Image (tube, helix red, strand yellow):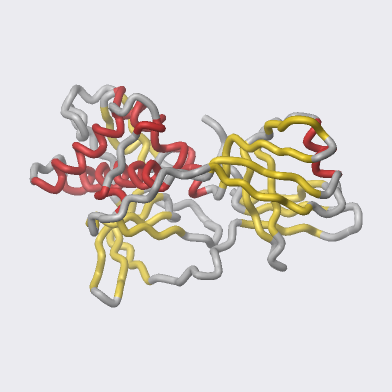
Amino acid sequence: MRRTAPESMSVLLPSGRSLDMAIRPPDTAESAAITLIETLNPRFFNDCPICGDPATNDEHVPPARLGGRVMTRTCAPCNNRLGSFVEADLVDWIEDAITIPYFRSEGVRGRRRAGRILFRTTPEGEFVLVVDGSSHPDIAAMLASGEVDLEACRPDRNRYTIALLKQAYLAACLKFGILENDALAQVRRDLLAARDAGSKHKVPPSSLALGLTVLRRYQPLHSAVAPVVRAVLHEDAGPIEGVLLAGRTFVSWSSTLAVKVPAPVDRLNRRLHVGVPEKGTVTWLNQ
């Protein structure tokens, strides 16, 4: 399993400056009050809670890379294929990452591929791009030129909310068992439509998933937390019941059924003005 990308890190520069960087909330972010109700325990079913086929595969809730543990079982397609279509976007959204990045500059002909890029911000408001993986060696010269064009993919909101719909549904099964009603039947239909889409680029939009209430935590976690906790979000309009996943993401058990479906995510295109390149030593990582 691939490691979790660090939410924050510090790099000691030759100048003596400690460059601290972390995932920080946007300026428009607001705080919210959540009450934790109970920790949910593993529960294993003979049949897959999503499609009803024999449950053969251990299922992490949330995904293992986001702090999940084996909490139930699903069938192989609902575990592997559905996960491969939607969970990468969830990881990228949580880790504030962009993927398939390419750089261009006037001094180098053509474009060059970099590894996955993490967005981090310093306390002074500077943004830092951290390459998470191997990159073409020409990129160093491109950055040294002082100006580069960056093209990359952002996490797809439809896919990562479908991943959260799956986690919230499985969490409900841990608490209540596999229930039969019209709302849950629609959840299962949306998950199966994503599973059987053929590729992640063909995953159909889910109004249920896009209408979920989703909040994320930006403060670092200082201790181990339960992977799945039943919780209540306190809103002016009334309480919203749902689940807190690995202490960092709240997902509601209800949906407003989004009417407006976002357009597919276009590739990100930005011109970057780069400062003087510096090398340093990573002094600590906070997972």
Q: Is residue 13 left or right of residue 286?
A: right
For the point 57% across and 46% down, which residue is it? 268
Please tell me in which quadrant of the rendered image residue 131 appears: top right
For the point 36% across and 55% down, which residue is it? 244
Task: Check the image and name the residue furthest to the right.
Answer: 15
Q: Is 192 situated above or below 92?
A: above
The residue closer to the viewer here, 46 or 41, is 46
Task: Check the image and name the residue furthest to the bottom.
Answer: 236
Q: Is residue 224 left or right of residue 198?
A: right
The residue closer to the viewer here, 187 or 101, is 101
For the point 25% across and 33% down, which residue is it? 193
Residue 170 is situated, as x and y percent measured from the top left of the image, at 26, 42
Residue 185 is situated, as x and y percent measured from the top left of the image, at 14, 41
Q: Is 56 situated above or below 274?
A: above
Residue 130 is situated, as x and y percent measured from the top left of the image, at 69, 45
Residue 266 is situated, as x and y percent measured from the top left of the image, at 50, 43
For the point 46% across and 41% down, which residue is it? 89
Q: Is residue 138 left or right of residue 26?
A: right
Q: Is residue 166 left or right of residue 94?
A: left
Number of marks in the rendered image: 0
